[in-house]
Amino acid sequence: MTTVILYTFAIGSSLGEYRHILSFIFAINDINNDPNILPNITLGYHIYDSCGHVNKVIKDVLQIMSGHSVTAPNYSCMEHGTVAGFIGDLQSVTTLPMAKFLGIYGYTQVSYGARDPALSDRRLYPHFFRTVQNNEEQYVALVKFLIYFKWNMVCIFTTNDDIGERDLRLLTAELQKSGICIELVWVFTHNKFIEFSVMNNLKAEVVILCGANSGLAKNIIGHSVQSIRDKTFIFMTSWTNDHDLIGSPAFGMPVNCSFMISPIAYEIFGFEEKFLSVHPSTHPHDPILEDIWITSFYCLSQNALKNSLLQATISKPLHNCSGKERFTKRTRYIEDGFPYNVLKAVRMMAQTLHHMHKALLMSKLNKKINKNNVYRKKVRHFMKLGCIQLPERTEIKCFNNKGELSEPLVISNVISKENMDLVIYVLNTRHIGTFDGSSQDWHLNMTPSPIVWINNKVPKSQCSEQCSPGYRKVVKEGAHICCYDCILCSEGKMSNVSDADNCKKCFSTEWPNETRDKCIPKMMDFLSYETDVVAYVFLLFSTLSSIVIVLIIGIFIYFRNTPVVRANNRNLSFIMLVSLKLSFLCIFLYIGKPEDTTCMFRHISFGIIFTVVLSSILAKTIMVCIAFKATTPGSYWRQWIGVRLPNAIVLVFSSLQVLNGIFWLSFSPPFQEEDMDSYPGKIIIECNEGSRLAFYCMFGYMGFLAGVSFVLAFMVRTLPDMYNEAKYITFSMLVFCSVWICAIPAYLSSKGKNMVSVEVFAILASGSFTIMEPQ
């Protein structure tokens, strides 16, 4: 039977560490009773109390590696055997020097609690493995926890050592990345108690305790009870095994609420029964158990000196116990997950040895397996490839490239109260959240309903009140970035979350509401029957004008054979009246939501139709001039009198406008356009002319015809009264030109429905004054 020895270091002065010791022994015995792991090989163990001192750890490790006898360990099984490896303790302060020394000699070390990020450097610590992840994960979990409660101002208590300095540096960097401010950093040093005046003036209501777990820190906190009253404490993983500090009101922690971030505590089958059966009568030579029994149940010891020493540190008097006292599931300890991590460490070491022995047997090196140098060379190689499946668990865990096993973290609310029957303090830990660092999004799952706040309200650990949606933060000059003022989002921007750093623009089709906390669709702006009264005014005026023209046409038809109508060029009058009526009806293309079709025919239809009107007026004006000239006997102009010339004038001049319209529609037709930027909160739906040259040519051409008609009519305005038609043509063309001269600047300087209203007004005014021209 081959014996393989595992060495472990622990701090056996507390109930929590005693559970770790028992879980280590429990795991060893479980493996020795399993015929499928390490057959014909017995695992032995030596457990040493490091007392939390680096010098003692270094001394013991050096003596173990040198083969010299060392001081008798607290617990041992097997006096001799091959050294397989070391199971590290909780504290990084002792694990780091152990890893350095063991790495030099090639011994493999597996830690169940040390989380120092420095140990992840595989170049410096190639032989170091751990069943937990480094502290970087808990920093992220802490930040997400703070963000969940919207706490952006915190205090940090840390220790005056390398661990405290490293924790402070890494934690500060993580907090700053998320915009969380540190109002106060308190470093525990001798005779530096926390001042009440300092803590009372702080805006931060949350205190984070990090660094190395030290008696000095606990002593300073214990003497600063009044200063930290009503604060909310968050304990990092390095402090979660300190049950006295976290849970005992007797120690002086009357805080508003306590939280701790710890490894997840999976239940180990059979271990809880083993722990609850522990009693000094079953372990009569266990000095650590005796000390724990005294501090838990205030029992008198047979050692008078121990009684006097413990009485000085315990607030309640010691008494003779009945012997029936037992640990219960409600006894003052916290399920911190470390027993489970101890079990993982031992199991991983055992499985590594199992696979290594099988490989050595197959390679015919069995004769060498009892030599320590083989273990030093081979254990690390097989440990890197090792995976583990624990009892009662389905998933398989393997070491990552940093030599770590990933497990979720648990955020717990710690509640303590005094149990008068047992005269001890009872801890109740309520899990309120989990954080899985192995997932890509590093998601924090929270169920805050079980949290018990001593003051029945969630503290506000903020420098400034939250900015409501619709506002953004503006950092105060010379202050923390968490101290800010709130200003309303500027026009066109919104914020739909509290404490927004910046306001954001809505989509082009949206606009912020009045409170600027959400985007709403922009209003469609166009000349509409539903929203604009002026549209009905235009409609009424156009209808009345059309009726008037219809009546005039009826009169002309009724008197069509009279000399007056015939002398007035009957056909030309009919053409002009029908065109005028159609030009009044063109305004229906201008009212309502513009579409591509209406945009294409809006200007072109009016331009062509009104050009026919102006061509007819021009033809009449020319005929008036010719008639005046033809009155002279033998005049050359007499041959132009008749219907052929006016019809030709109308056809020729109208055809030019038709050609312009055809080219316009062929090459760059008008289309619907949405103007998003001209007016805040509105989408102006308008018609884009497409080709501005064609647009200007159309209206310019109409102006040209009106101008020619005006000049010719003005020249013959002095005819006798029987030829006074020229006077009316002069007046109507003068008004037409005046209307459009005034309308063009107004048209160009307006947008949306205002621009359409100007154009419709100009059309109606032009048509109205044109009716005045006698037919």
Image (tube, rainbow, N blue to C red):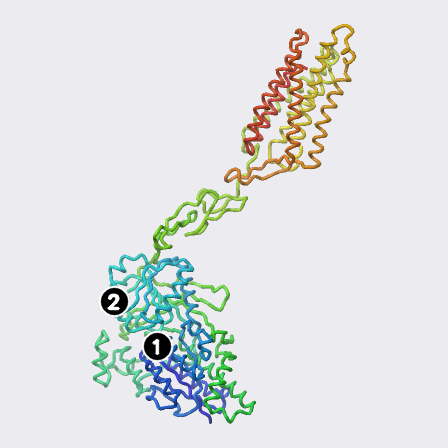
From the viewer's side, name the closer residue of 289 and 501: 501
As shown in the figure, which amino acid type bears the numbered disc 1?
Gly
- The part of the image, by quadrant, that contains residue 570 is top right
Q: Residue at x 72, y 30 (%)?
A: 659
Q: Locate residue 602 relative to residue 655 in the image: left or right.
A: left
Q: Kindly identify the amino acid type of the residue bearing the numbered disc 2.
A: Lys
Left or right: residue 165 versus residue 357 is: left
- Seen in the picture, residue 672 relative to 341 is either above or below; the reply is above
Secondary element at tag 2? loop
x%, y% of residue 498?
42, 52
Q: Are marks 2 and 1 in contact (CB under 8 Å)?
A: no
Q: Quadrant of residue 188?
A: bottom left
Depth check: 631 or 677 in front? Answer: 631
Identify the residue under disc 1: 16
Residue 34: x percent and y percent?
Answer: 48, 86
Circle 2 Cα neighbour tier, 10 Å, few/some/many (<14 / 14–19 / ≥20): few
**Which one is in front, 374 or 769?**
374
The residue that label 2 is drawn on is 192
